[in-house]
Image (cartoon, rainbow, N blue to C red):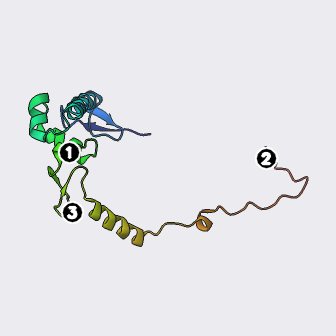
Amino acid sequence: MNASLRNCPECGRIFGYMGRNLCPECLGKEENEYMTVRKYVRDHPGAGVFEVAEATGIEEEKILQFLRDGRLQSRGFQGTLECERCGNKITGGRYCEACRGQMDASIRQVAPPRNKTQEAKPASPARKKGEKMYTKD
């Protein structure tokens, strides 16, 4: 895999991009923050974003990003996020169930799933007994 060089948006360090837009140090820090928030939410299931931020010292925006990424869910977060497509309240992710279903149906119309006969590879020609493959020196 070829890594391109980027600047970390958190700390400004140059790093080899490998799929996440954070340097390894900031990625580790973010993972620690996530685990802190996750533990607090697990221990306090009805806590809202403001309460979690106050108790953990982690910014509300970071907690909301964990929700948008689908990494966190809690009944205390209900109504915190809005579907980016229709504006309905959601508990996690970026889209509500109805919009995800509509987008999925739209994608299927544009690119229908391939059936098994289309995916089958053409059969290799049958070899006669005694046929061998040779390479030229």
Marks 2 and 3, how far apart at CA: 60 Å
Residue type at mark 1? Arg
Q: Residues within 10 Å of mark 1 (few under 14, many from 20)?
A: few
* Residue at disc 2, secondary structure: loop
Front one among 75 and 101 = 75
Q: Is residue 120 left or right of residue 15?
A: right
Disc with the residue nearer the chain's start (1 vs 2): 1
Q: Which residue is mark 3?
A: 85
Q: Residue furthest bottom?
A: 109
Asked whether the beta carbons under mark 3 and mark 1 sit within 8 Å of each other, the answer is no
Amino acid marked by disc 3 = Arg
Q: Residues within 10 Å of mark 3 (few under 14, many from 20)?
A: few
Residue drawn at (82%, 48%) of the image: 134
Q: Residues within 10 Å of mark 2 (few under 14, many from 20)?
A: few
The residue drawn where x is 37% and y is 38% is 3
Q: Which residue is mark 1?
A: 75
Quadrant of the image containing the N terminus: top left
Under circle 1, the secondary element is helix
Residue occupying image coordinates x 77% and y 62%: 125
| Residue at horizontal 29 percent and vertical 60 percent from the top | 97
Distance between the alpha carbons at the discs numbered 3 and 1: 22 Å
State the image coordinates of residue 86 (x, y, percent, origin top left): 19, 64
Q: Name the element at disc 3.
A: loop
Q: Quadrant of the C terminus?
A: top right
Q: Which mark is residue 135?
A: 2
Is 65 above or below relative to 102? above
- Residue 92 location (% of width, % of height): 24, 49
17 to the left or right of 48: right
Which residue type does callout 2 highlight?
Answer: Thr
